[in-house]
Amino acid sequence: MSTATHHAVELRYATTSDVDAVADASRVLLALEGSRGTVGVRGRVREPALFRDALAATLGILASDLRYRGKDRTAYLAYLMKQGKRATAQIWEAQKAFLEQSLEGDKQADAVLDPLLTVDPDQVSLEVFSRDESAYARLTFDNSLFEGREVAHGSTFLDVPADLLAKVDRLRTYVPVSLEAHVALPARNTEQTRAPRNVEVPHAWLRGFLQVQSAATLPASTCTLAPIDLYNLLFALRTRKAKKAPRALRFELVPGAQPRLVLEPWELVLECHGPKYQGSTPAVVRTFGRQRLAALARLLPHAQGVRVQMLGPGLPVFWVIDLGPATLTLALTGWTESGWSSAAAFDALMPRAVPDGLAETLRNRLRKEGPRTFEELASGTDAPKDAVRGALQLECLRGRVLYDIARGTYRPRELLATPVDEAVIRYGNEREERAHRLLGDGGPGAGEVKLTKVHDVVGVGTKLHGEVVDREAVRSFFPSFLLDLEGRVREASCGCPPYRRSGMREGPCEHMIALRLAYARQRAQEEALRQTPKGRALIRAETRSYVRRDESGQEQVYRVSLDGKLVSVEWGPRLGEQRHQRLWFDTDSEARTAYFTRLESLAAEGFIDSVGGSV
């Protein structure tokens, strides 16, 4: 394998993880990788049921894989051949070769890092990344869960054989249960000495895993749910199946009111019973990947509280499940099988300029003093807070610092023996790297990207048109595509040779990625500028949607548009007949003033801006 796309890691295990269960006691034996020094934990579990269910749920997330897999049609092709149909032996052989190649690719994709176990003075944590790289989970056990706890601090990898989940699932909680996780567990009599295992970890896997760590440090909209709210959500998802898009889970957050969950496409409203939303501004946030929440069903009997942190379009959503002496943090990534979201999201996760030595100073302080909040770290240095946040974000990308969302603290944690080079995982592929070059992010042959037209199509998505000046190719390209409500691309076109050769079968070309990145950056700048009088003066055309739900559950929608001297208003029930109004003004300034006055009036009446927080 090419060293340019993989990171070599050698794993040495003395034995295999197992569960030793007898009539009067059970032991969970977890084998740890031995090249990272002495790391381990030992103790009797005070709450065996909680320990079993939490560990089984985490291992289930590790084994989950929701990627689409094609069906084996070789038997059907053989049947057609017997019937004299047009199914030749060449088609049959091609089908078999394709399936074998796909299976080999799956095997290579499984060559990733094992789960990471970290023993800290106050807790033991286990980090896993699902096989389809769409879900990250961090399970923590507090010291109070163990009796007679003995530890050796550090981080190392955990051996997880294929049958470990089934063995953990068979633990009986009416007998004493103990945990032994160590690098030097004694081998069973029938077990042969294990040879070292060399793993070529793809940089794409490291990129996805570390993106979650970096995203956890960003500001988020946070709401708290009651355990019964999670039960209602899982029950609704289990008893329904969406056959058409959109399939989002929508959060409606109004300051001073309890959150609402809305399931698309049925527009099923779930009233929450937890604390009221404490945010300063109302928001509607659409999240995806809701089927992966089924992994939390097993934790419902132990859940004492649920906290949801939503970062924004294309970024992960964090679900923090409070289990008393244990906590499970589940991150659902926003870029599953989507180069578009991945490119745009990771662009926001890369820290800007960081002063030399600041990242190393903060890391050394964490290693010396233990977990610290951002405010504590910022107060101990003369650097600006933006620089401190960027330095901590950089250390998260290197795999040497972890942000504990459940407790709001930064922790020292070594993913690998040597830090990951952030430049290696900066780009997901060569096309993404060329797209950043076109945007002028460094490197020779910088180009120019212009957004020539942005058209919001009601109920469909956003149509983007652009011009990309590629100085390396000495010509301009004119990509365009439609981003639907779930961030997927439709109706794409470009004049470059890769697109003309294979269309979208090989993914978006660098010109489309560059246009998508330019659009994401422009939206971020506009959202920041529109909060100032100077920024509002630059807005000549814009469309915003505001929603409000009454006591009966019916949703009223206002759609207000500014286009030069014209202000258009469309309002009415979401699923009913809409009313329209068009207002013409003498000058652009008068139209702009009337437009923002209308938006402020809607916000004062309790309507929520559904554009700023949605995809």
Image (cartoon, grey):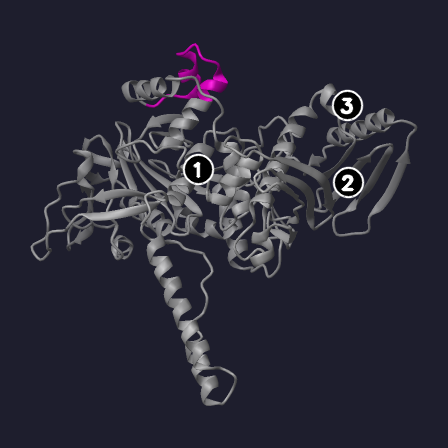
The residue singled out by tag 2 in the image is: 559
**Is label 2 in contact with label 1 (beta carbons under 8 Å)?**
no
- Precedes in sequence: disc 2 or disc 1: 1
Instruction: Answer with mark 1 or mark 3, whichever residue precedes in sequence.
Output: 1
Q: Quadrant of the C terminus?
A: top right
Kind of residue at disc 3? Ala
Looking at the rendered structure, the kind of residue marked 2 is Arg
Residue 277 in the image, given as x and y percentages of width and height: 58, 32
Q: Distance between the residues labelled 1 and 3?
A: 36 Å
* Residue at 38 percent of width and 26 percent of height: 410
Q: Which mark is residue 211?
A: 1
Q: Which amino acid does label 1 sit on?
A: Gln
From mark 2 to mark 3, how far is it between C-alphas? Answer: 21 Å
Q: Nearer the viewer, residue 585 or 162?
A: 585
Query: Circle 1 — which element?
Result: helix
Which residue sits at x=65%, y=33%? 523
Q: What segment carries the magenta color?
A: 371-389
- Residue at 18% of width from left, 31% of height from top? 152
Do the numbered discs 2 and 3 sit on residues whose CB atoms are within 8 Å?
no
Residue ID for mark 3: 537
Q: Does the magenta stretch include residue 461?
A: no
Name the image quarter holding residue 214: top left
Mark 1 and mark 3 in contact? Answer it, CB < 8 Å: no
- Residue 384 lies within the magenta run: yes
> Does 226 sit left or right of 173 as displayed?
right
Please tell me which of labels 2 and 3 falls first in the chain. 3
- Residue most extreme to the front: 474
Crowd tier of the residue under label 2, counting other residues whose Cα lies within 10 Å: few below 14, some 14–19, many 20 or above: some
